[in-house]
Image (cartoon, rainbow, N blue to C red):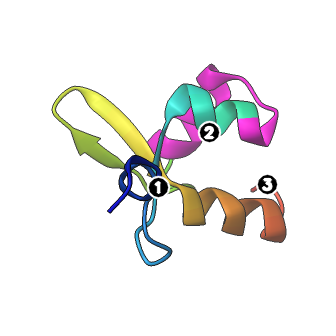
Amino acid sequence: MTSTEKDQAPDHVDRLLSISEAAGRLGISTFFLYRLVEAGKIPSVKIQRRRLLRESDIRRLVQKGMP
């Protein structure tokens, strides 16, 4: 396995995005994204102190439109 293969996630693995990364992709503020997460509009996972969002959930939100 080359270093390039190790750096890329397999297709079946969903990448986790930080609130900042996800907000940037959605074109909204981190504050507004936190409010959507707290209201249960966007699912998230918490790993230790970090709140992360699945890339597939962000794609789905873009396709459906903002709540």
**Label 3, on which residue?**
66
Q: Quadrant of residue 20?
A: top right
Q: Residue farthest to the left?
A: 48
Give the percent coordinates (x, y) of residue 60: 69, 69
CA separation in Å, label 1 and label 3: 29 Å
Q: Residue farthest to the front?
A: 2
**Magenta-colored segment: predominant secondary structure:** helix
Report if the CB atoms under discs 1 and 3 are less than 8 Å apart.
no
Give the percent coordinates (x, y) of residue 19: 52, 32
Neighbor class of circle 3 (other Cα within 10 Å; few <14, some 14-19, many 20+) is: few
Judging from the image, what secondary structure is the residue with disc 2 in? helix
Q: What label sits on residue 8 in the rendered view?
A: 1
- Label 2 vs 1, first from the N-terminus: 1
**Label 2, on which residue?**
22
- Of the 4 image quadrants, the one containing the N terminus is bottom left
Judging from the image, what secondary structure is the residue with disc 1 in? loop
In the rendered view, does 58 fall on the left or right side of 11?
Answer: right
Name the residue located 38 percent from the left edge and 47 percent from the top edge. Answer: 3
Give the percent coordinates (x, y) of residue 55: 56, 57
The amino acid type of the residue labelled 1 equals: Gln
Neighbor class of circle 1 (other Cα within 10 Å; few <14, some 14-19, many 20+) is: few
The amino acid type of the residue labelled 2 equals: Ala
Q: Nearer the viewer, mark 2 or mark 1?
A: 1
Name the residue located 43 percent from the left edge and 59 percent from the top edge. Answer: 5
Neighbor class of circle 2 (other Cα within 10 Å; few <14, some 14-19, many 20+) is: many
Name the residue located 43 percent from the left edge and 70 percent from the top edge. Answer: 10
Question: In the rendered structure, does residue 20 fall within the stretch colored magenta?
Answer: no
Measured along the vertical axis of the image, is residue 16 above or below residue 14?
A: above
Question: In the rendered structure, does residue 37 fall within the stretch colored magenta?
Answer: yes
Give the percent coordinates (x, y) of residue 21: 60, 32
CA separation in Å, label 2 and label 3: 13 Å
